[in-house]
Amino acid sequence: MRTYVVAGGTAGMGKGLALHFLSRGDQVTVVGADPAKGRRFLDEAAALGAASRAAYIQADLTSVAANLRVIEEVKARHSALDGLVLTAVRHFPQRVETPDGFEGTFSLYYVSRLLLSYGLTGLLEKGADPMIVSICGVGMTKGEIHWDDLSLRQGYGSVKAMLQGGRATDLLGVAYAANHPGGRTRYLLHHPGFTDSGTDSLRQPAKTIIKLLAKVMAQPVGKSIQPIIELMDEPPAGRGLLAYDRRTPVPASTPTLDPGNARRLYEQTRHLLAALDQ
């Protein structure tokens, strides 16, 4: 039996992966902000006969304090992890600033993944063949890091924020691998393609537009998670960073995976990791 934590595991691809792990006999803890979705997940786990192997932690992962609480709860619950799956992301139509001073998209897409990745490394290193999976837009080159305005106080746009979050998440994976050269934990950046994973965070008219497009163009969750399952079950040889667009490797030479920029972003945000030692 393997043990997984899925951040964003009460909906979309995160939920799909969590239920897949439970269906084959694994132990899964999911993290999500909405208690109603958490209860539905536990009900579905019970229907699979997996109630004793499923757990839900309620947390708004835009908050640094909430991420730290999740890390402590996971440590109290598990002695080792085989996988950490990072799927939580949300569309913010207007700029939202978190209590920690970050723009909401950046906080959820990058800061939360930074804290969970580094904060749970100790448990992952005790796993049989551990992997962090970050579902993102790796391979895309649109968007940029706004180095002097990470929280987008000047000229916010929801698409601009999502693209910056995606580029920051790419760099997180690069920096993590560079910071753990002797570690056993692989870091997989995975772009699943357009997936019909819900529109809860969208407002009209965007919600209707995306729903219509999804009916015609999007893959169902069950299909989108298959390449991830394959890579987790039979990872390529070697350690460190893996980057895939569905089943196609993304070259390390891709400009959005630049090691210098990864180091720059890490140095600009590494102060957040001091909270892990408190």
Image (spheres, rainbow, N blue to C red):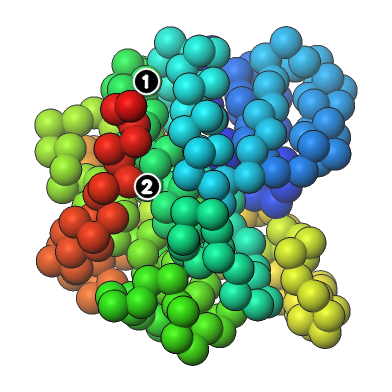
Crowd around label 1: few <14 · some 14–19 · many ≥20 (10 Å)? some
Q: In which quarter of the image is residue 27?
A: top right
For marks 1 and 2, the one nearer the N-term is 2
Q: Would residue 252 be visible to someone looking at this image?
A: no
Residue 28 seen by the camera: yes
Based on the displayed image, in which of its 4 quarters is residue 220 positioned? bottom right
Q: State left or right for residue 267 relative to residue 64.
A: left
Image quadrant where one finds the C terminus:
top left
User: Residue 75 got which mark?
Assistant: none
Picture residue at 47% right of the left edge, 33% below the top = 68
**SS label for mark 2:** helix
The kind of secondary structure element at disc 1 is: helix
Q: Would you call the spot at circle 2 few (<14 residues within 10 Å), some (14-19), or many (20 or more)?
A: many
Q: In this rendering, is residue 44 above or below 11?
A: above
Relative to 237, is 161 above or below? Answer: below
Give the amino acid at mark 2: Leu
What residue do we see at 30% from left, 41% from top? 273
Q: Residue at 37% across / 71% down in the picture?
A: 150
**51 shown above or below 167:** above
Q: Residue 206 vs residue 100: left or right?
A: right
Q: In this view, does 209 lie to the left or right of 7?
A: right
Q: Nearer the viewer, residue 211 or 249?
A: 211
In front of the other: label 1 or label 2? Answer: 2
Q: Quadrant of the N terminus?
A: top right
Q: In the rendered image, which residue does mark 2 sit on?
A: 114
Which residue is identified by label 1? 123
Give how far across and how far down residue 54 sits, in percent.
69, 20
Q: What residue type is labelled 1?
A: Leu
